[in-house]
Image (spheres, helix red, strand yellow):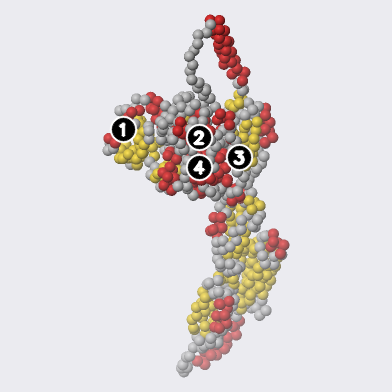
């Protein structure tokens, strides 16, 4: 069909190149000229254009896949027919198949194999939830995009779960290397058939080889029926027992021994690489000898030479009944009429007995059906009573759940409303309540790393720690503390993180430069110095600094200092009015001094928190108000919450006319007040 290249289907899909194909169809890379995107176009091969069975299968692929919408399933965009050309337009996945990846790379890293299988399980679980069984799961039908994400495709032989029974005894659909025993036997296909195929795919990913091989499709199918699965650990020494157990359970010969659903398989797979499961006990898979006795053992050299790459051909038949011993034919001697009459009578009686058996026995032996009751949300004891009344057995599995109350049913399998045989077993998943863990230790981490570590918690709150005992941004404390038993989804964590230390600037006016530099070094501050003449401050001592005394500063801040260079030298000049000015100055000097005189005092206010309150993390709301010569009404000096003892220093400006006062409030209750007068 290379003649399609360069043509346009339905005036919309331009065919560019052949990119794949199989026994039924070719796949081309195309371009949707309307939406301007690359697409994959699957076209039924011409020899099947008149074959109604293949056309139905081709249509079924489109119908099955279009009903599914999942990130791990290839999207179907369009399907149609044009001049005996049957086609399906689907998402183009740029990458390669899982089969090619394993062929090129061999056994995959375990974490990668587990991650890919979880993606595949999610896709198949979505299909099963929509009552679609894939029936042809194999690495060839799993595409890997450039990001390494898995996408399942080719639902060509998928059918609704309610009609998933193979009725053609001479044809078994599907790929023989991944075929479940019931598919090979021509029996009823259920979602557990997909579970078996998924187990074989996982086997191939972790070992790089297939479990069974042979000279023909029939011989391989018989091995699925008759031979125990070769242990994956024999092909990959050191394989965790937990991962091997998942493969063994998924590929059990008897569907009843497999996982109840792909969801159960995914849940088990999610913890296989955890350290606590690495050396778990090997899974002992029951091997049903009776299931294989009815199937004659055919050696590879005796099997049909008609092999298929992807499945069992219509000319190959798997025998599901014992073969009669073949005895060389002997010449039949003539019997007497009397003897012939007796034989005829016996045959008639045998035919009558057989007819009666086929007519009456099925009704006698038929097991009654019953409807599965709804038990989700019920207490376990009540749910078991419901199942018992319906004639059903129960098995329980305990699971953590954040919403369903402890000892109540989270889910059930089969679901409510399904019709099953009396005495069937229903799996009840019972809540253990929310999962609890030990609180991890995040002290010593930086703020962002700690918040990421606690991303599964209900919330994270931060509080500043200005003690200066740790680098800025480092977590210095946590609540709950390390080792506490908590439920992450219900727990808000409080973290203390270090910030640059803030403190009150001392009064350095009048201090020598050497004393100032020692102070700056002790408190991790920077200093900038300027000189200025002063008649009142001795040379080499501080006239003033900014920030000023009793202002808040933070480690690393720069404080600007003005240092005295001594009195300014001024040449004396005669002045006729100098005596008058001196007298005037002397007359008003005392009055001006009284008006301008003021001084600063420092109120030291220790607030003590008991050790018992500190251990309990009790919080106290502190507010300090002050009033002095610089204010017209009381102002707030600080308001904050503390959990440990702290000392406050409040600078107050006082004059002969105005006192300085402060008031301390703890939790809005006045606990201390004091006043300072000029000259005290």
Give the residue drawn at x 60%, y 85%: 590
User: Residue 10, labelled with which disc?
Assistant: 1
Foreground: disc 4 or disc 1? 4
**Distance in Å between CA atoms under marks 4 and 1:** 43 Å
For residue 463, above or below residue 374? below
Give the residue drawn at x 46%, y 38%: 213
Residue on which the image places disc 2: 223
Q: Is there CB contact under 8 Å for labels 4 and 2? A: no
Residue 677, located in which quarter of the rendered image? bottom right
User: Residue 284, labelled with which disc?
Assistant: 3
* 102 left or right of 370 in image: left
Residue 592, located in which quarter of the rendered image? bottom right
Q: Quadrant of the C terminus?
A: bottom right
Q: Position of residue 541 (x, y in %)?
A: 55, 84
Foreground: disc 2 or disc 3? 2
- Element class at badge 4: helix
* 155 left or right of 617 in image: left
Q: Nearer the viewer, residue 434 or 270?
A: 270
Q: Residues within 10 Å of mark 4 (few under 14, many from 20)?
A: many
């Amino acid at each position: 069909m290379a003649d399609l290249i360069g043509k346009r289907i339905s005036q919309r899909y331009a065919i560019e190149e052949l990119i794949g194909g199989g026994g039924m169809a070719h796949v081309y890379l195309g371009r949707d000229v309307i939406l301007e995107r690359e697409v994959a176009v699957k076209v039924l091969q011409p020899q099947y254009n008149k074959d109604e069975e293949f056309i139905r299968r081709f249509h079924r692929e489109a119908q099955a896949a279009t009903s599914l919408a999942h990130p791990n399933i290839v999207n179907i965009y369009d399907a149609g027919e044009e001049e005996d050309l049957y086609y399906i337009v689907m998402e183009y996945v740029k990458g390669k198949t899982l089969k090619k990846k394993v062929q090129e790379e061999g056994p995959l890293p375990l974490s990668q194999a587990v991650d890919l299988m979880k993606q595949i399980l999610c896709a198949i679980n979505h299909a099963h939830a929509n009552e679609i069984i894939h029936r042809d799961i194999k690495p060839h039908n799993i595409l890997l995009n450039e990001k390494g994400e898995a996408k399942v495709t080719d639902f060509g032989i998928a059918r609704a779960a309610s009609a998933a029974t193979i009725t053609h005894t001479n044809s078994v659909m599907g790929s023989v290397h991944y075929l479940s025993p019931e598919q090979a036997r021509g029996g009823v296909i259920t979602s557990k058939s997909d579970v078996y195929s998924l187990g074989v795919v996982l086997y191939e990913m972790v070992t790089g080889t297939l479990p069974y091989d042979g000279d023909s499709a029939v011989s391989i199918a018989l091995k699925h029926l008759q031979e125990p699965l070769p242990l994956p650990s024999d092909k990959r020494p050191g394989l965790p027992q937990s991962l091997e157990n998942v493969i063994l359970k998924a590929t059990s010969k008897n569907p009843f021994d497999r996982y109840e659903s792909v969801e159960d398989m995914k849940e088990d797979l999610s913890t296989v690489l955890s350290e606590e499961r690495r050396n778990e006990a090997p899974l002992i898979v029951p091997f049903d000898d009776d299931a294989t006795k009815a199937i004659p053992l055919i050696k590879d050299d005796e099997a049909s030479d008609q092999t298929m790459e992807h499945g069992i051909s219509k000319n190959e038949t798997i025998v599901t009944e014992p073969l009669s011993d073949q005895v060389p034919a002997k010449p039949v001697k003539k019997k007497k009429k009397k003897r012939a009459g007796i034989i005829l009578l016996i045959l008639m009686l045998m035919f009558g007995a057989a007819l009666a058996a086929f007519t009456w026995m099925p009704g006698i032996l038929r097991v009654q059906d019953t409807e599965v009751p709804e038990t989700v949300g019920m207490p376990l004891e009540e749910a078991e009573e419901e199942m018992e009344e319906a004639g059903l057995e129960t098995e329980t599995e305990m699971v953590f759940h954040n919403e369903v109350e402890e000892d109540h049913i989270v889910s059930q399998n089969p679901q409510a409303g399904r019709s099953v045989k009396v005495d069937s077993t229903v799996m009840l998943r019972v809540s253990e309540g929310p999962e609890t863990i030990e609180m991890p230790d995040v002290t010593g981490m930086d703020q962002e790393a700690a918040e990421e570590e606690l991303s599964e918690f209900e919330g994270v709150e931060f509080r500043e720690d200005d003690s200066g005992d740790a680098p800025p941004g480092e977590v210095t404390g946590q609540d709950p503390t390390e080792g506490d038993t908590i439920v992450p989804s219900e727990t808000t964590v409080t973290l203390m993180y270090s910030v640059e230390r803030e403190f009150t600037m001392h009064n350095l006016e009048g201090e020598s430069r050497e004393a100032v530099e020692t102070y700056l070094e002790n408190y991790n501050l920077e200093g900038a110095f300027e000189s200025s003449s002063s008649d009142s401050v001795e040379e080499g001592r501080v006239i003033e600094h900014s920030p000023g005394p009793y202002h808040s500063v933070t480690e690393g801040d720069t404080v600007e200092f003005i240092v005295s260079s001594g009195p300014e030298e001024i040449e004396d000049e005669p002045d006729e009015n100098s005596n008058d000015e001196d007298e005037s100055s002397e007359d008003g000097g005392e009055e001006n001094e009284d008006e301008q005189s003021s001084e600063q005092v420092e109120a030291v206010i220790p607030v003590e928190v008991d050790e018992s309150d500190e251990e309990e993390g009790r919080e106290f709301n502190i507010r300090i108000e002050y009033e002095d010569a610089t204010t017209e009404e009381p102002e707030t000096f600080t308001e904050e919450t503390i959990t440990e003892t702290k000392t406050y220093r409040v600078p107050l400006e006082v004059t002969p006319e105005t006192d300085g006062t402060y008031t301390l409030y703890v939790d809005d209750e006045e606990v201390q007040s004091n006043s300072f007068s000029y000259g005290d």
